[in-house]
Amino acid sequence: MDRRFSGIARLYGEAGAGAIARARLCVVGVGGVGSWAVEALARSGVGRITLIDMDHVAESNINRQLPALESTLGRAKIVVLAERVAQINPACEITLVDDFVSPDNLEVLLEQEHDWVLDCIDNARVKAAMIAWCRARGRRIVTVGAAGGQIDPTRVRVSDLRRTEQDALLARTRRILRQQAGFPTNPRRSFGVPAVWSDEPVRTFENCANDGSLNCSGFGACMPVTAAFGLAAAALVLRDLAGGA
């Protein structure tokens, strides 16, 4: 085991650390949530990571997104993150997909086999399509809810998608899955999809511009919360990988 990841081996065991090193993971969306998930995966010794996003670093990202610095403004987020991962773990194989996921291109963008897909986007229609696509093919996926409008990272939770509360983005995603993808309509039946969410009510201020959207630009967001969402998703994946070693 590489000395830089010896702490991972002591924590998860040699077999668990080996499973993490052999893992093939995909992070869809590398903004305020996904970028921190990538950091956690890289620092845990994950061997192969695919990054899917088409966005570029903007000044408005600096309050919450890992790749956002004065020196990186205007650069592709996936490229900035790939350079960072290479500095953390030169052995990690990074695949960059400069595109936005949509219901029409899932087959192409996700065709490579991955042990886990981390859904870190904020569009309910696309989230539902991606979850349905992965579930139909036996692919494991963790979905992340809306991190905007919240200030307390200690209220982040992980549960089955059926059990989320206080999260309009995941509620919309759940409704689409029930209406269009045949997911259980019985509220007592699990979806079989882990979700990261917060039970903190969303905060809004009338004197602040708010376009009403569910993403961070709509409500405002802080790094302690967006990072907590991404770290929780990464931790779930790491536990599963190590537990299955």
Image (cartoon, helix red, strand yellow):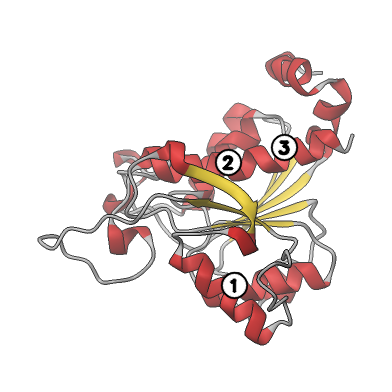
Secondary structure under tag 3 reads helix
Percent of width and height locating residue 136: 81, 73
Seen in the picture, residue 2 relative to 183 is either above or below; the reply is above
The residue that mark 2 highlights is: 232
Q: Quadrant of residue 65?
A: top left
174, 241: nearer the viewer:
174
Q: Mark 1 or mark 2, which is nearer to you?
A: 1
Which three-letter amino acid code belongs to the residue tagged 2? Answer: Ala
The residue that mark 3 highlights is: 238
Q: Residue furthest left?
A: 207
Secondary structure under tag 1 reads helix
Count of marks placed on residues = 3
Percent of width and height locating residue 129: 65, 76
Q: Quadrant of residue 12?
A: top right
Percent of width and height locating residue 243: 83, 35
Q: Earlier in the sequence, mark 3 or mark 1?
A: 1
Task: Find the distance from the CA under tag 1 to the CA under tag 2.
Answer: 20 Å
Tell me the quarter of the image containing the N terminus.
top right
Percent of width and height locating residue 39: 56, 36
Seen in the picture, residue 139 relative to 84 is either above or below; the reply is below
Secondary structure under tag 2 reads helix
Q: Earlier in the sequence, mark 2 or mark 3?
A: 2
Q: Quadrant of residue 193?
A: bottom right
Q: Residues within 10 Å of mark 3 (few under 14, many from 20)?
A: many
Q: Is residue 190 left or right of residue 232?
A: right
The residue that mark 1 highlights is: 174
